[in-house]
Amino acid sequence: MDQFFTNARLIDPEAMTDDMGSLLVRDGVIIGRGGPDDAAPEGATVIDCRGRALAPGIVDWGVKIGEPGERHKESFRSAGLAAAAGGVTTIIARPDTLPPIDTPEALEFVGRRTADAPVNIHHMAALTKSREGREMVEIGFLTDLGAVAFTDGVRVVRDTKLLTRCMTYARGLNALIVGHPQEAGLSQGAAATSGKFSSLYGIPAVSPMAEVMGLDRDLALVAMTGCRWHADQITTAASLPALERARKAGLDVTAGISIHHLTLNEFDVGDYRTFFRFTPPLRSEDDRQAMVQAVADGVIDVIASFHTPQDEESKRLPFEEAAPGAVGLQTLLPAALRLHHQGGLTLPQLLRAMSLNPARRLGLPAGRLSNGAPADLILFDPDAPFIMDRFALLSKSKNTPFDGARMQGRVQGTWVAGRRVFGENT
């Protein structure tokens, strides 16, 4: 079956181009690109994009799904529906479930549950058993079962000797370790970034240097072991020099950031709204602008939602006691488009960080518009305005900091392997 996307504004993060053209898909695979005036092959289903943007589907790295243990917060089905509506065609799920994904049996269970979702889902596994930082998981078995990376999430492995063993073992299997660069002692209990603002509002805070200290330790261990390593969130300007030095030294390291740290700053916490409670906490405006520039320069490789569903009971608490995190599968694209409309990032730069780079790092074929790539596509109008209503989100949990915000960018259609999973004729 042929599908012919015509009159499309093709956003190609691989070639870094933004041009009008057409795209031909056969049996769920991209087989050719053409000009805006090319005719459709005989018998093909024609999809008129009407000048809107057609791009590779988003690969969202670091999504929390509540199965097992917290299905009331998010299920595979609800996460999949929210992802499709947000232009996310591939979810990279975190292992911080109840219980965590730390055994082959747990990974097999969640692997079977992904059939409920209309999008691709790949899983990371825990790095240590129960994410307690005491004993390494069976990295080899979990890799064989399809784990794409290993991480304890925001729980920093404090035992440096154990982390060194994990990295050494992972290097032998070419497995990827995802770290959370923070000095655990300094960060414990912190809900804001230290400074005049946190002091004025009386919120427990941590210095940005806690991130630098954690990053320096982890990069030293990467240099010692030679493993593949990714920082889940780099959020302060002071961390960037160490990251750049590591790359110049030839270390196999990459880094990501959440969309919330790219579009919000510490002052958004102003009225103690717990939807703005994150780990790590929101940073200064200077740090935020430095991170946007780092994405533009390619120092920060990946932008992700870090989708973390929390129920109302977890958020209706004093700010420092509230559960951190926000949902983001449906808000990732319009929030990222803020950076485009403000002139900080082009559409190819955004899609490079949200689609191409995470797919490449994880060894997935997605994130491209080139021949042979899977037809995981999103069609969106980057200029369409709307008011975000958290109750219209398809996630079970509604904890978004963008509730009531004026945003631009609506997804018109989402395809996974050529099958339409969102939009008309879904």
Image: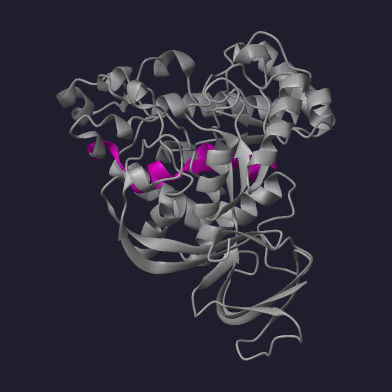
Which quadrant of the view contains residue 398? top left
Highlighted magenta segment, given as a residue range: 241-267
Q: Locate residue 191 relative to residue 350 in the image: left or right.
A: left
Q: Is residue 137 above or below residue 9?
A: above
Question: Percent position (x, y) of residue 323?
Answer: 38, 23
The residue positioned 68% from the left and 26% from the top of the image is 125
Q: Is residue 88 above or below residue 97?
A: below
Work out whether residue 312 or residue 264 is closer to the camera in this orientation and state it: 312
Q: Locate residue 232 relative to residue 277 in the image: left or right.
A: right
Q: Residue furthest front?
A: 425
Q: Residue furthest left?
A: 200
Q: Is residue 191 above or below residue 238?
A: above
Query: Quick one: quadrant of the C terminus?
Result: bottom right
Q: Is residue 359 visible?
A: yes
Q: Is residue 176 visible?
A: no
Assess whether residue 40 is covered by the magenta stretch.
Answer: no
Assess whether residue 250 is covered by the magenta stretch.
Answer: yes
Question: Percent position (x, y) of residue 17?
Answer: 58, 73
Work out whether residue 91 or residue 155 is closer to the camera in this orientation and state it: 91
Work out whether residue 258 or residue 39 is closer to the camera in this orientation and state it: 39
Q: Locate residue 406 relative to residue 49 in the image: left or right.
A: left
Give the mark count. Answer: 0
The residue positioned 61% from the left and 35% from the top of the image is 93
Q: Locate residue 61 relative to residue 279 in the image: left or right.
A: right
The residue positioned 56% from the left and 20% from the top of the image is 69
Q: Is residue 14 above or below residue 126?
A: below
Which quadrant of the view contains residue 408? bottom left
